[in-house]
Image (cartoon, grey):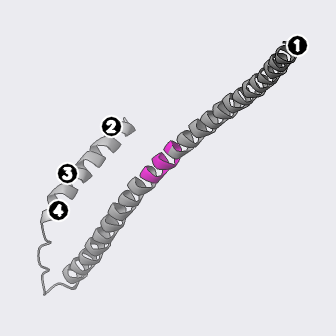
Amino acid sequence: MKYKALTSSILRWQREEAETEEKEPLPPCHDSVESMEVFKQHCQIAEEYHEVKKEIALLEQRKKELIAKLDQAEKEKVDAAELVREFEALTEENRTLKLAQSQCVEQLEKLRIQYQKRQGSS
């Protein structure tokens, strides 16, 4: 039951907020000190309210910027991890190719020796 009352209070406050955004307060009754005080308080509260709204808008914008930065940092982290994996794969491929090259050099040297022996025996 309390939840329902709270919800209706919030909805009523949101409606009132939307309605009062465009409206200005009624001018005070200059004959009444209390009316003048209420008007003055209202003006102060309205000014504070608008300052808070501005601050909220700035904070929302900053939040969006920080989320974008975070997304970019995460993307770069993923990109960096991919580059590390690619580097490791290329390093392994390079090692394999160097081993194959040295084996080919050895075979070539053996073939030269065999060829020279054949030339010498002929």
Q: Locate residue 74 relative to residue 3 in the image: left or right.
A: right
**Image quarter of the N terminus:** top left
Residue carrying label 1: 121
The label nearer to you, 3 versus 1, is: 1
Measured in 3D between alpha carbons, the distance from the residue under mark 3 to the one under mark 1, in whole angstroms, is 109 Å
| Residue drawn at x 31%, y 64% as measured from the top left | 53
Residue carrying label 2: 4
In the image, residue 100 sits, relative to residue 78, either above or below, namely: above
Q: How far across and down, in percent of the image, does residue 37 sit?
A: 25, 81
Mostly what secondary structure, the magenta segment?
A: helix
Residue carrying label 3: 15
Q: Is residue 72 magenta?
A: yes
Of the residues under marks 2 and 1, which one precedes in the sequence? 2
Of the residues under marks 4 and 2, which one precedes in the sequence? 2
Element assignment for label 3: helix
Q: How far across and down, in percent of the image, does residue 13 sit?
A: 26, 53
Residue carrying label 4: 20
Dot 3 amino acid type: Arg
**Image quarter of the C terminus:** top right
- Residue stretch in magenta: 68-75
Q: Are marks 3 and 4 in contact (CB under 8 Å)?
A: no
Characterize the local packing of mark 2: few (<14), some (14-19) or many (20 or more) Cα atoms within 10 angstroms: few
The label nearer to you, 4 versus 2, is: 4
Return the residue nearer the eye: 112 or 65: 112
Element assignment for label 4: helix
The label nearer to you, 2 versus 3, is: 3
Q: Are marks 2 and 3 in contact (CB under 8 Å)?
A: no
Dot 4 amino acid type: Thr
Q: Are marks 4 and 2 in contact (CB under 8 Å)?
A: no
Of the residues under marks 1 and 4, which one precedes in the sequence? 4
